[in-house]
Amino acid sequence: AQSVAQPEDQVNVAEGNPLTVKCTYSVSGNPYLFWYVQYPNRGLQFLLKYITGDNLVKGSYGFEAEFNKSQTSFHLKKPSALVSDSALYFCAVSPLSGGYQKVTFGIGTKLQVIP
Amino acid sequence: GAGVSQSPSNKVTEKGKDVELRCDPISGHTALYWYRQSLGQGLEFLIYFQGNSAPDKSGLPSDRFSAERTGGSVSTLTIQRTQQEDSAVYLCASSLAGTSGGPDTQYFGPGTRLTVL
């Protein structure tokens, strides 16, 4: 069975500082990996995804994530946090197997950027 | 273009009543997902439809939950004999069929907030 772990319920960071939101996964074979963001009172939005290729994936709003196969991790990063980045972030995984598209989400990490 | 829409946006019901939640996916999206979001529980997968294939119902928590997708488009999630623990936000998402047969980016609706009294 596939699973996602987001070990931190909440991450606090000062505005302008770099931020990291952690994610580890478990899946049979190679993974598809995603990050989604949920702003207050708004729906979930896609941030970025990893399928194959370069381990460093760049996404929306200046976010990036690094795929590390040996550590089965896909941490979300941003060099300089903005107050507007405060939101709930979800990591998700799906197996890279033909035709199967069930996506498993983590529990979410609340990011609080402090002015 | 139009995104994923869900109705109603809010539903308050009494314990024991049946409810139907509707999802209109983005036109042309072959995959449709239902999730449940409860406080502190993240996104819980419920069911997944892909084209004409049999749906993956492995996430439905009990036989009180069912879903159908008519004509490969609109989907309805039905909860029978609702219980207080069914209170949550129910999210629908749709996507294109991804490359290499895997998942593509999901586009989420605004959700239906269900409250069971």
Image (cartoon, rainbow, N blue to C red):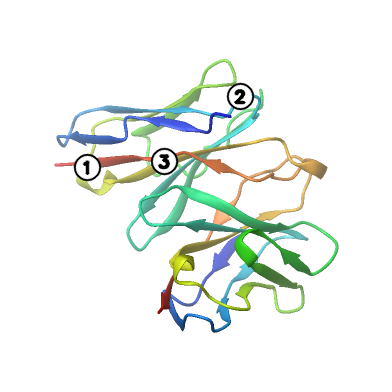
Of labels 2 and 1, the one closer to you: 2
Residue corresponding to mark 1: B115
Q: Position of residue B84 (x, y in %)?
A: 20, 46
Q: What subunit carries mark 3?
A: B
Tag 3: amino acid: Pro
Tell me the element at label 2. Answer: loop
Q: Quadrant of the N terminus of chain A?
A: bottom right
Tell me the element at label 1. Answer: strand
Q: Position of residue A49 (x, y in %)?
A: 69, 57
Tag 1: amino acid: Thr
Residue corresponding to mark 2: B27
- Is A88 situated left or right of A101 in this image? left
Seen from the viewer's position, the closer of residues B89 and A54 is A54
Q: What subunit carries mark 1?
A: B
Query: Which numbered disc covers residue B110?
Result: 3
Q: Quadrant of the C terminus of chain A?
A: bottom left
Query: Mark 2 or mark 3, which is nearer the start of the sequence?
Result: 2
Tag 2: amino acid: Ser
Q: Is residue A108 visible?
A: no
* Other-residue count near label 1 (Cα within 10 Å), few / some / many at <14 / 14–19 / ≥20: some
Is A49 located above or below residue B78 in the figure? below
At a point 76% along the width and 53% down the height, the residue shown is A96
Q: Position of residue B32 (x, y in %)?
A: 57, 34
Query: Mark 3 or mark 1, which is nearer the start of the sequence?
Result: 3
Query: Mark 1 or mark 2, which is nearer the start of the sequence?
Result: 2
